[in-house]
Image: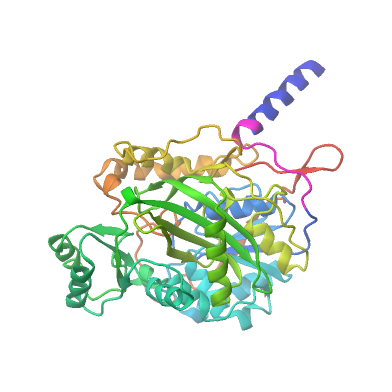
C-alpha cells in the first residue's frame, strides 16, 4: 500500500512538472489579512486574466473575491477564488450605480481590500472615483484623469508626442468625410480601432483592430454605422517588417518602476492584430527603459500592460496600446523570486517591500483555445518565428493548471459554440476579435441604463487554497 501511495505521488509530481513547473522559493510574506477584489465591466466570461489573478494571489494565501457574470465562468470555478459576486454588467449602467455597487461589495467583504481592475473600463472608473472608493479599498495613487487618457488611442498619441515616445501616426475623425481624408493622407492600408473605453461597449465602430485595404472597403464598413462612432484611423505597420513586443510593469508609490518585464508576441488571434495566443519572455533593456521613461514622464502609478511594435524600417519601437491594468497575459512574466505585477501591487499597497529580481527568461506563454487557431492563421507566413515547445524557462498556460483544473474545463464547455467561427476568412485577415487582451466580449444587448445596477450579494464561497508547501517551510507555486 505504501508503494502504491508513492507511485501516485510520483504521478502527481510529474503532472505538475508538465503543466507548470514548481517555482520558487523565497517568496516574501504577504499580508493575508488584506483580501483582493477583482472587478471588470462588460460581458466577456472567458477572461483568462481574471483566472490568472485569482490563482497568483490565491496561491500565496491572499483571499480573492471576484465579480463574475454567473457562477459558471472559468474564474468563478477556480479553487483559488474565495468568494464570487454575480454582477452581469454591460457598460450602459449609470456611473453612480457602478460606484455604489463596488462600495456595497466593499461592505460585504468587511475589511479594506486591494481593488484590482481587469479591464480598462473598470480601471478608469476606479481612478475617477478614487476618493470615494479609497474609503473601502486600497488603490494606487494615480492622477484621476490619467487612466482615461492613456486608454484612449488618440489621447495616448498626444501623451506620446509630449514625452517624445514613438507611436504610429493616427487621428480621430469627426465625420465619415474626415475619416476618408485621414486614410487618404496616410495611404492604404490603414488600421481602424475603437478609440476609448466605454465607447467600444456603447457604440463600437469595429469589433477589433481592422485592417482596411482600400477606399471601397472603408466605405462598406462605414455603411454599417448609424452614427459616427468613436474610431481612430492609424498608420499601418506591416507585420512583414515589424516585430511585436509586450511590456508589463508595476510602477510603485513614488512612480519608480518597481518591476518591468519584456517579451515577444509570437502568435496572436486574429493573426497580427488580436490578443496574444503564444508569447515568449525575452530581455530587452532598450524597450524596458523606453517604457519606464514613458511611465515616469506621464506620472503613471500602478499596473500597466503595453503593446509595442518594432518597426524595422526605421529601427524604432512604437507604442500601440497602453492597458491601465494587468494585461490578460500578465502571468507570462515573473521574477525568479516568484513576483509578478499582481503580487507586486498587493505587496506595495499593504506596505511591504517588493523584492527586485531577474525576470525568468525564455518562458513560453500559451492560451490554449487561441493558440491552435492562431497557428492556422500563421501557417503560410514565411517570416513567422519558430515556436520552442520546451523552452528553458518553462511553459505558463493561461487555462490549464494541475492544481486548478475546473477553469480549463469550463472554458472548453463555453467555447464550443464559437468553434464554427474559427474557419472563417477573418482568421487570416485579422479583422475580427478584440484589440485588448479581453479574450471575447460576448455580443449582448446593452439594455437600458441602470440595468443590473447592483451585484448579487448571494455569493458562493469556497475555502482559500493558500500556498502549496513542500518541506522545510519553503513555498512553491505552480504555473497556470
Q: Main secondary structure of the magenta part?
A: loop
The residue depicted at 48 percent of the width and 79 percent of the height is 95
Q: Is residue 225 above or below residue 401?
A: below
Question: Quarter of the image containing the C terminus?
Answer: top right
Q: Locate residue 203, reporting x and y percent.
A: 32, 71
Q: Is 222 on the left-hand or right-hand side of 58?
A: left
Residue drawn at point x = 29 percent, y = 37 percent: 380
In this view, 108 is above or below 439? below
Q: Is residue 203 visible?
A: yes
Q: Position of residue 377 (x, y in %)?
A: 32, 41
Q: Nearer the viewer, residue 289 or 196?
A: 289
Q: Identify whether 344 is placed above or below 422.
A: below
Evaluate whether residue 71 shows in this view. Answer: no
For the point 14% across and 64% down, the residue is 215
Query: What colouring style does the render use?
Result: rainbow
On the image, which quarter does residue 473 sit in?
Answer: top right
Residue placed furthest toward the right: 472
Counting from the top left corner in percent of width and height, residue 46 is at 47, 51
Tally the marks.
0
Q: Is residue 477 above or below residue 440?
A: above
In this picture, which residue range is highlighted in magenta? Answer: 17-27
Q: In the orientation shown, which residue stands out farthest toward the front?
A: 314
Q: Quadrant of the N terminus?
A: top right
Q: Nearer the viewer, residue 466 or 272?
A: 272
Using the rendered view, name the quadrant where residue 319 is placed: bottom left
In reply to whether residue 14 is colored magenta, the answer given is no
Coordinates of residue 317 in the picture (x, y in percent): 44, 60
Q: Is residue 424 left or right of residue 340?
A: left
> For this rendering, which residue is in front, 82 or 260?
260
View extreme (bottom): residue: 131
Amino acid at each position: 500500500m505504501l508503494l502504491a501511495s508513492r507511485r501516485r505521488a510520483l504521478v502527481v509530481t510529474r503532472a505538475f512538472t508538465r503543466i507548470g513547473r514548481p517555482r520558487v522559493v523565497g517568496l516574501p510574506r504577504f499580508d493575508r489579512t488584506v483580501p483582493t477584489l477583482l472587478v471588470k465591466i462588460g460581458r466577456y466570461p472567458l477572461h483568462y486574466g481574471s483566472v490568472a489573478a485569482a490563482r497568483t494571489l490565491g496561491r500565496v494565501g491572499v483571499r480573492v473575491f471576484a465579480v463574475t457574470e454567473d457562477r459558471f465562468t472559468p474564474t468563478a470555478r477556480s479553487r483559488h477564488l474565495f468568494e464570487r459576486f454575480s454582477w452581469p454588467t454591460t457598460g450602459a449602467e449609470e456611473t453612480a450605480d457602478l460606484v455604489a455597487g463596488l462600495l456595497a461589495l466593499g461592505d460585504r467583504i468587511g475589511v479594506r481590500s486591494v481593488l484590482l481592475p481587469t479591464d480598462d473600463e473598470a480601471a478608469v472608473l476606479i481612478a475617477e472615483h478614487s476618493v470615494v472608493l479609497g474609503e473601502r479599498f486600497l488603490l494606487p495613487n494615480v492622477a484621476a484623469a490619467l487612466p482615461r487618457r492613456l486608454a484612449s488611442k488618440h489621447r495616448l498619441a498626444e501623451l506620446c508626442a509630449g514625452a517624445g515616445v514613438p507611436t504610429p501616426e493616427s487621428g480621430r475623425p469627426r465625420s465619415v468625410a474626415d475619416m476618408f481624408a485621414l486614410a487618404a493622407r496616410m495611404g492604404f492600408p490603414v488600421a481602424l480601432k475603437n478609440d476609448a473605453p466605454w465607447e467600444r461597449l456603447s457604440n463600437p465602430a469595429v469589433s477589433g483592430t481592422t485592417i482596411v485595404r482600400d477606399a471601397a472597403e472603408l466605405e462598406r464598413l462605414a455603411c454599417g454605422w448609424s452614427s459616427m462612432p468613436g474610431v481612430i484611423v492609424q498608420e499601418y505597420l506591416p507585420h512583414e517588417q515589424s516585430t511585436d513586443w509586450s511590456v508589463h510593469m508595476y510602477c510603485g508609490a513614488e512612480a519608480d518602476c518597481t518591476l518591468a518585464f519584456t517579451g515577444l508576441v509570437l502568435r496572436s488571434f486574429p493573426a497580427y492584430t488580436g490578443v496574444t495566443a503564444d508569447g515568449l519572455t525575452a530581455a530587452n533593456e532598450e524597450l524596458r527603459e523606453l517604457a519606464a521613461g514613458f511611465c515616469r514622464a506621464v506620472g503613471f502609478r500602478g499596473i500597466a500592460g503595453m503593446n509595442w511594435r518594432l518597426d524595422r524600417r526605421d529601427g524604432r519601437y512604437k507604442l500601440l496600446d497602453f492597458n491601465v491594468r494587468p494585461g490578460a497575459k500578465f502571468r507570462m512574466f515573473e521574477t525568479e523570486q516568484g513576483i509578478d505585477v499582481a503580487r507586486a501591487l498587493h505587496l506595495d499597497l499593504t506596505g511591504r517591500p517588493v523584492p527586485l529580481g531577474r525576470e525568468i527568461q525564455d518562458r513560453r506563454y500559451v492560451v490554449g483555445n487561441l493558440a491552435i487557431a492562431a497557428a492556422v492563421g500563421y501557417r503560410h507566413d514565411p517570416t513567422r518565428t519558430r515556436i520552442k515547445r520546451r523552452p528553458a524557462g518553462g511553459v505558463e498556460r493561461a487555462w490549464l493548471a494541475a492544481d486548478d483544473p475546473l477553469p480549463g474545463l469550463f472554458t472548453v464547455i463555453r467555447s464550443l459554440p464559437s468553434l464554427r467561427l474559427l474557419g472563417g476568412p477573418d482568421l487570416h485577415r485579422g479583422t475580427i476579435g478584440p484589440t485588448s487582451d479581453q479574450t471575447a466580449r460576448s455580443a449582448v444587448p446593452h439594455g437600458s441604463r441602470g440595468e443590473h445596477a447592483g451585484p448579487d450579494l448571494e455569493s458562493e464561497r469556497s475555502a482559500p487554497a493558500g500556498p502549496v508547501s513542500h518541506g522545510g517551510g519553503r513555498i512553491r507555486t505552480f504555473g497556470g
